[in-house]
Image: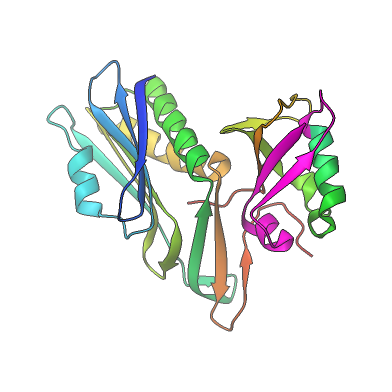
């Protein structure tokens, strides 16, 4: 299945793109996606353990399962305000 | 909890979410904007004949941080999620405190020294609730809202601020 991952701030700059399409086996989780992104974009491998992921507009944990065509966001530690 | 939510992007680059609250029927707002925050309009919106207090918090761009001089900040956000998170924070603040109005506005794009990047205006019948809710809202916003700042240094260069992330 295909999952789209939006990238922000340092993750976007280090990757030189603002989104990725990642192919994953059915039944994959956010944890599997994290590993797949690290493999696909070595430039952000180092920071990935410290980022959160969101599915749609809600934070998700590594155990959260992914649906086909999920819209996922990679959320580095936030600094608004 | 919000009864209905709608978001739109206007021609001027503002993204708004308007939340009609079931209990009070009043119109409340969280907003992401690329324009300077209109503080008088925000205070007018926060006011209410039922309020005895309006508390305004402004987060402003600081020039010096630990000996380094900032020229300006750039803010970026995941707009749909930021609006959702800010709406949820507002709803939670209303559960914790008896509030009249609650307005949250955050800027994106370039913010110059001294300018507000975030404004929170809260009103309540008595001041304690407005003070406490205002502080709680900015503290929570800084932890959960998907918004990021980039420091642009006056000597050139810049870096994204990601607390706890090792950016070697």
Q: Quadrant of residue B129?
A: top left
Q: Position of residue A72 (x, y in %)?
A: 66, 37
Which residue: 24% across, 46% down?
A: B42
Please tell me whether residue B154 is drawn above or below residue B46 in the rendered image. Answer: below
- A9 in magenta: yes
* B131 relative position to B26: left or right: right
Q: Quadrant of the N terminus of chain A?
A: top right
* B161 relative position to B51: left or right: right
Q: Position of residue B147 (x, y in %)?
A: 53, 49
Which residue: 67% across, 58% down?
A: A17
Q: How is the image coloured?
A: rainbow
* B25 relative position to B7: left or right: left
Q: Position of residue A15 (x, y in %)?
A: 73, 59
* A81 relative position to B13: left or right: right
In the displayed orientation, state which residue is furthest to the left: B49
Give the mark count: 0
Q: Point out the stretch of residues depicted in magenta.
A: A1-30
Q: Position of residue B52 (x, y in %)?
A: 18, 32
Which residue: 22% across, 27% down?
A: B125
Which residue: 82% across, 25% down?
A: A26
In the displayed orientation, state which residue is furthest to the top: B23
Q: Quadrant of residue B54?
A: top left
Residue in front for this viewpoint, A35 or A69? A69
- A4 in magenta: yes
């Amino acid at each position: 299945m295909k999952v789209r991952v939006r990238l922000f701030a340092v993750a976007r700059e280090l990757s030189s793109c603002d989104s990725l399409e990642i192919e994953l086996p059915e039944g994959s989780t956010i944890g599997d996606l994290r590993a797949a992104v690290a493999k696909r974009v070595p430039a952000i491998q180092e920071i990935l353990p410290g980022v959160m992921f969101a599915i749609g507009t809600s934070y998700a944990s590594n155990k959260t399962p992914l649906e086909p065509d999920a819209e996922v966001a990679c959320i580095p530690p936030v600094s608004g305000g | 909890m919000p009864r209905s939510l709608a978001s739109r992007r206007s021609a001027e680059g503002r993204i708004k979410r308007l939340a009609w609250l079931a209990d009070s029927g009043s119109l409340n707002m969280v907003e992401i904007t690329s324009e300077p925050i209109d503080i008088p309009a925000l205070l007018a919106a926060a006011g209410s004949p039922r309020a005895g207090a309006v508390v305004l918090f402004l987060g402003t761009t600081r020039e010096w941080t630990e000996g380094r001089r900032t020229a300006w900040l750039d803010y970026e956000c995941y707009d749909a999620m930021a609006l959702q998170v800010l709406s949820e924070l507002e709803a939670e603040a209303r559960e914790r405190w008896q509030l009249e109005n609650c307005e949250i506005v955050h800027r994106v794009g370039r913010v110059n020294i001294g300018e507000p990047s975030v404004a929170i205006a809260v009103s309540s019948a008595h001041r304690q609730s407005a003070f406490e809710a205002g502080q709680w809202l900015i503290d929570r916003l800084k932890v959960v809202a998907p918004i990021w700042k980039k420091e642009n240094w006056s000597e050139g260069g810049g870096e994204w601020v990601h607390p706890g992330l090792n950016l070697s």
